[in-house]
Image (cartoon, grey):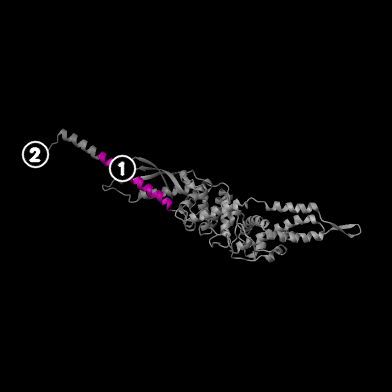
Amino acid sequence: MRRGYITVFLSLSLTLILSLVFTVIEGARISAIRMKFECVTDIGMNSVLAEYHRELLKQYDLLFVDTSYCGSHPDIANTEAHLRGYMQKNFQAGEGKSLFGGKEFLAMNMGIAEILEYSIASDDGGAVLKRQVTDYMRDYPVGAVLDKISGNVGFLQGAGLDSMDVGARRREYESQIEAIGLPKKEVEEGKFEEVPLDNPADIANAARGSGVLNLVLEDASAVSAVKVNLGEYLSHRQGRMSGTGVCREAVEVGGEANELVFQTYLFEKCGYYGAEMEKSLLKYQIEYMLAGEDTDWQNLEQTAKKLLLWREAANVIYILSDSAKVAEAQAMAAALAAVTLMPALMEPVKYTILFAWAYVESLQDVKTLLSGGRVPIMKTAADWKTGINAIKNIKGSLAEDSGGSGLNYKEYLQIMLFLQNAETRTERAMDIIEMDIRRTPGNAWFRLDGCFDAYQARLLVNSRFGYSYEMTRRYGFY
């Protein structure tokens, strides 16, 4: 029989060896838990971004997560709950007993999932949304388009068409006629009446109150009759959601070049008169961005009025420089002055006729543009369409014209949109996006101020072996 024994030295050695082994195992577990935490965080936070709004991507190529999740109450707390759920599910995946029947080696539970920062689409006057647009348009060949828009804007402003007050100049000559007065004739004993001047310019001036569309469209009833409640949309909404400024350095998208890029994007995604889009609620979306009215009719009417003002300014400048047309107006004014035996009336009457003629020509220009034709910013004799007698029969003298040279309706809209206040333009563009998305199934309450594209989260997990781990990470569509 042999005796078995162990030395004190070996006992002490085994204690040290086992301590080292267990320390290594525990260190491996801690490292593995941290690695698992990192992996689950990546999965969880990307899973939140994977819930991007499908219709928003489909229609506008924008990537945002709707915090209402197709409900009526957007709230970042909803996203926190989604993030917590994704994290917990991934921590539980494959969970069970260890090889030796004890606790799972990397067992963890989700503790805190708190979103600290997030960038909402409408933050900073829509700068977050515009940053995505700029990224989307990065490979779009916009250079030539931007140069053309800039050139047209510069030409129009250089000619002073956006600042000239044609109405004030016209009223000066009308005041001169009133100051001179008309001769009176006795119709009955002791009763006198003014001799009528019969100035054809009065006919044109009377038409100014009829509305531009009623004068220039063959069938005004064909204009879209859509009406919306603007109080439901972002530009009129009280108590908007706002983000907390995540990645603020990434949303600096101001400047003329980026505004032109944004404008090019709007013309790609939105409709206007003559180029309406089936998906849209308001059919004249660019006109809405310009006018901000609640009906298609009013948006188109206000845009046509702006066009008319520009064209009238340009046509007045031209007609006063055309000696042949000035001579025609002078001959007509001389005949009227001769009838009244008031030579002093000839000069102011001549100018009222010229202004009326320019007005009728401007109506023809607007009709041409709405018919799909082209009109140059500044005309020559070859571009002039109407005769002097058109001021006596305005609507009957206007003709549809889909030809011509110069700019078309879209190019005039581009100038108008560029001159629009940038914040107003952006907010109304976001109104249009909301209108269109709400027309799709399940999105009746969609709000852009409830959508985010980047967020920062603080995450805390508890190991079932008594450890806690915390991590802060930032994810987004950039």
Mark 1 or 2, which is nearer the eye? Answer: 1
Residue under the image location 37 percent in, 45 percent down: 109
Residue under the image location 23 percent in, 38 percent down: 20
Left or right of 79: which side holds 328?
right
Q: CA distance from mark 1 to mark 2?
A: 46 Å
Q: What amino acid type is highlighted by mark number 2?
A: Arg
Q: Residue furthest top?
A: 8
- The residue that mark 1 highlights is 31
- The residue that mark 2 highlights is 2
What label does residue 365 carry, if any?
A: none
Front residue of 437/254: it is 254
Res 246 seen here? no
- Residue 207 lies, in percent from the top left, at 71, 60
Front residue of 101/270: it is 270
> Within 10 Å of the Cα at label 1, are there few (<14), some (14-19), or many (20+) other Cα atoms?
few
Secondary structure of residue under mark 1: helix
Residue under the image location 36 percent in, 40 percent down: 468
Front residue of 178/342: it is 342
Q: What amino acid type is highlighted by mark number 1?
A: Ser
> Within 10 Å of the Cα at label 2, are there few (<14), some (14-19), or many (20+) other Cα atoms?
few
The stretch drawn in magenta includes residue 378: no
Res 304 seen here? yes
The stretch drawn in magenta includes residue 28: yes
- Residue 253 lies, in percent from the top left, at 49, 47
- Residue 59 lies, in percent from the top left, at 49, 58
Which segment is the magenta one?
22-50
Q: Earlier in the sequence, mark 1 or mark 2?
A: 2
